[in-house]
Amino acid sequence: MKKFPETMISENQKTWDIVADAFVDASALPVWGPFGVGEDLNLIPKIQGSTFLEIGCGSGRSIKYLTEENADKVYGLDLSTKQVEEATSYNHQEILQGKVQIIQGPMEEKIDIEPVDIVFSIYAIGWTPEPEKTLKNIHSYLKPGGLFIWSWDHSFFADIDYQDKQYTVVHSYHNEEIREMQNWKREGTKANIAYRKTSSWFQLQRDAGFEVIGYHEPKPRDLSRGQTDPSRYYAIQKAEKVPCSFIFVCKKKA
């Protein structure tokens, strides 16, 4: 199945505008994904006085966390109109103070901001149908020596499903493809994700000029945040068997 990137982005935007309210309390700093993963890793070396850009800022909860920890300036970028509205409302006072700027647009298109110390993303980068463009943009937003930290579903986690009372590998790990999900979170929606192997992400980041200085496959920290039905995607039983997330820490060469 082939789709143009513009079609994928447009369909994903429409879907996110519909389902945005279901993600108001989605994972946000200091957490990097479901089950509280990454909370103990202390991946951001310094918040106070630093500048940040969040790719896929969602409802703006991570932005609020950073400003409360005395970040100097935080930019947020998101594709969804509804998410941008929520993030703007939630960080209204900080926006008035000039500490926060929320921008709507796809991550594949370059935005005009001052270079930042850290670009980060929690479960958003994997949505891009054009990772080369996205990673090149992110590289350009960083100061020399700046960090790019991001999390996403572990590639193998996405290949496993619960069938006939057991977990089964339902996708080939080697088959990098567009996975189209109908009725994603809500009836009538369509979500498109271009699945990639973990090794491909390593190479894409190197090609964009990054040095990968850290890679994590964290264990679940809080199973109460998961789903008890084994057939659900983020089931506790599944997360106990295979890593649900990976987290990359990359550096822009000085």
Image: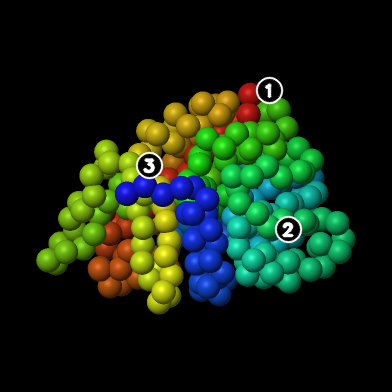
Q: Amino acid at mark 1?
A: Ala
Alpha carbons under labels 3 and 2: distance apart: 29 Å
Q: Residue at x 76, y 37 (%)?
A: 115
Instruction: Residue 229: tell me if it is visible.
Output: yes
Alpha carbons under labels 3 and 1: distance apart: 28 Å
Residue 22 in the image: state x and y as whole percent.
Answer: 51, 73
Using residue 49 as the reference point, say whether residue 146 is left or right of it.
left
**Disc 2 residue crowd, few under 14, some 14–19, many 20+, Cα 10 Å:** many
The residue lying toward the viewer, choosing from 105 and 93, is 105
Using residue 244 as the reference point, say whether residue 31 is left or right of it.
right
Residue designated by label 2? 102
Q: Residue at x 87, y 61 (%)?
A: 97
| Of marks 3 and 1, the one in the foreground | 3
Q: Amino acid at mark 3?
A: Arg
- SS at circle 3: loop
**Disc 3 residue crowd, few under 14, some 14–19, many 20+, Cα 10 Å:** some
Residue designated by label 3? 196
Residue 198 in the image: state x and y as whole percent.
Answer: 38, 38
Residue 133 in the image: state x and y as whole percent.
Answer: 57, 37
> Is there a contact, CB below 8 Å, between mark 3 and mark 1?
no
- SS at circle 2: strand
Q: How many marks?
A: 3
Residue at the far left in the pictured view: 164
The residue lying toward the viewer, choosing from 163 and 45, is 163
Instruction: Residue 155: tell me if it is visible.
Output: no
| Nearest to N terminus: mark 3 or mark 2 | 2
